[in-house]
Amino acid sequence: MAAQAGLAAEAHMLIARYALFFEYVGTKFHGSARTPNFATVQGELENSLSNLSLAVLPRVHMSSRTDAGVHALRNSAHVDIVRRKRDGNEIVAPYTAQDILRAANHHLHTDAIRVVDVLPASPCFHARHSAVGREYIYRLVYPRAAHKGVLPRPIFEASRAWVLPGPPDMALMEQACAILQGRHDFSSFRGASCEAKSPVRSVDSITLRETGEGFFSPGMHGLEVRVCARAFLYHQVRYLVSTIAQVGLGKMKLEDVRKLIETPRTAAAPLIAPPDGLFLCRVNYDLVADAAALKEVGSLKLPAEIQDRIAAADVIGTDTGLVVRVDLPNDVTAELALAGTRWTYTARRADETLRTTSHDLTRMGVVAPGCEAAVLRAVLVRCIAESYLERALFWPGAAARGEDGSDAEDQA
C-alpha cells in the first residue's frame, strides 16, 4: 500500500528544494520578475524547468529582482520540484542537482541566460530571506581627458557601462563613499515606487577600483563601484552610484551628500544612474549551515506506522476542494485541506490545535492534471515531518528548531 501511494522511508523528501545560481544579460529581458507577455529571467527559468516530468509545474522564487537592463553575474533562486513518472501520476524520487542543471540549460530558449550551478537545499532555505549579503558592481567608463562636443560612445561597452564625460576626482568620490556607508535612512536613495516597509538599510561597504584602459574601448578608462549590503531598497544602488559620480564630476558637493542622509526624502537624489552598468555580482548564503539542515531532514525516518497510515488515508472530495486526514500516535489527528489553490494543514489533539499552517499552492507551482491527490499526500507528509523536526508533537525526543524570521528583501 505504501508503494502504491509513492511513499517510502524518505517520503518527506519527495518535494525537493533546489538552489539555482545563474547569470544573464539584462538588456535581453524585461527585468527578472515574471511579467505577462514579456521575456523575463524568471519566466525563462520556469519554462525551461517545465520540460521535466513534474507533478507540479515549477514556481521559481528569485533572491533579487533586477530591472530591465540590469545584468547578473550570479543571481540566485530556489524552486520546489515534485517529480512524477513519465507514464503516470505517481510521485517518485527527486532529480539530482546535476539533472536539474543539465535540463535547465538544455531547454533554455536564449543564450542570454545560463544556469551555472544547482545545489540541493533544505526546506527552510529561501533564496531571498536566507541571504546574508549581496554584492553589486557598477561599471563606469570615461575618456582620459575631459571631452568637449559629442561624447564618444564605445560600441563594445554599449549596455555594459555608464559613459562619463571626463575623468572624475577619485579622492572626492572616496569621501562620498565614506559618507554613504553604514546604517542610515536611505529614503533619498530609493525609487518612488519602493514597497519596502522601512527605508533603513545597512550598507557594509562601497569601494572603488580603477580598471585602466579597456581592451574593447581604447582611449577610455574604467572604474568599478562595488556596493555590499544584506539587502537594498528599490533603485538604491543606482542612486548611490549616481551621487558618487556627480561628486567626482564636480556637479555635487560632499555637503550635498550629507544633507541627503541627514534629511531623507524619497527619491531626493538628483539623478539615477542608467541600468546598463549595473551587475548583480553575487548573493551570499551560509551554505554550510543549510547543508547541515538538509542532512538533518534527510536523516529523518518517519516511523513505518506513520507511513502506512498516510498511505491508507483516503483523499476525499468536498464542496470546497480536497481533504486528507490521518490519525497519528498520541491521539493526534493531522489534516490537509485544499480549497482552490490554498492548502491548510492542521494538527489537533482532542480540542487543542497543536499546529496550523496555510499556504497558497501556487507558491510551489501549478499542479498537473491528475496529480492533485498525489501532491496532497506529499504535502501532508512534508508537514508532518516538519512538525516532527521543529518540536515533539507526536514522538518524544524530537529536536526543537527555531525559524528564521528574516524579512530581508532586495530590489536593486
Image: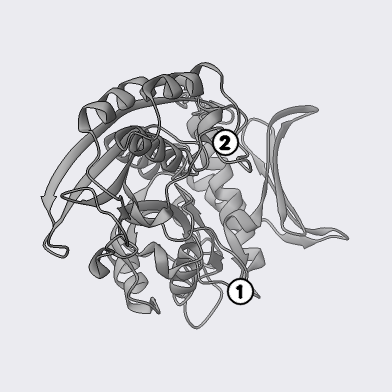
- Of the pair 164 and 349, the residue shown nearer to us: 164
Cβ atoms at labels 1 and 2 below 8 Å apart: no
Q: Residue 291: percent from the left, percent from the top?
A: 30, 40
Indicate the position of residue 406 as horizontal and vertical percent values. Answer: 50, 29
Query: Callout 2 environment at 10 Å: few (<14), some (14 to 19), or many (20+)?
Result: many
Kindly indicate the quadrant of the structure image that contains residue 114: bottom left
**Could you tell which of marks 1 and 2 lies nearer the N-terminus?**
1
In depth, the one of 363 and 251 nearer the eye is 251
Relative to 308, is 257 on the left or the right? Answer: left
Residue 15 showing in the rendered view: no
Amino acid at the residue labelled 2: Ala
In the picture as drawn, the residue positioned furthest to the top comes out as 262
* Residue at left offset 57%, top offset 36%: 267
Vertical arrangement, residue 266 with respect to residue 358, above or below:
above
**Tag in front: 1 or 2:** 2
Secondary element at image label 2: loop
- x 81%, y 28%: residue: 351
Inter-mark Cα distance, 1 to 2: 30 Å
Q: Residue at x 30, y 50 (%)?
A: 164
Instruction: Determine which residue is flagged by label 2.
Output: 267
Q: Which residue is mark 1?
A: 37
Side (left or right) of 375 relative to 47? right
Q: What amino acid does circle 1 point to? A: Asn
Query: Would you identify the image quadrant in which residue 244 lies?
Result: top left
Q: Residue at x 60, y 54 (%)?
A: 363
For disc 1, the neighbor class at 10 Å (few under 14, some 14 to 19, many from 20) is: few
Give above or below for 23 relative to 307: below
Q: Nearer the viewer, residue 407 or 312?
A: 407
Please state, as top left, top right, bottom left or bottom right, where the N terminus lies in the image: bottom right
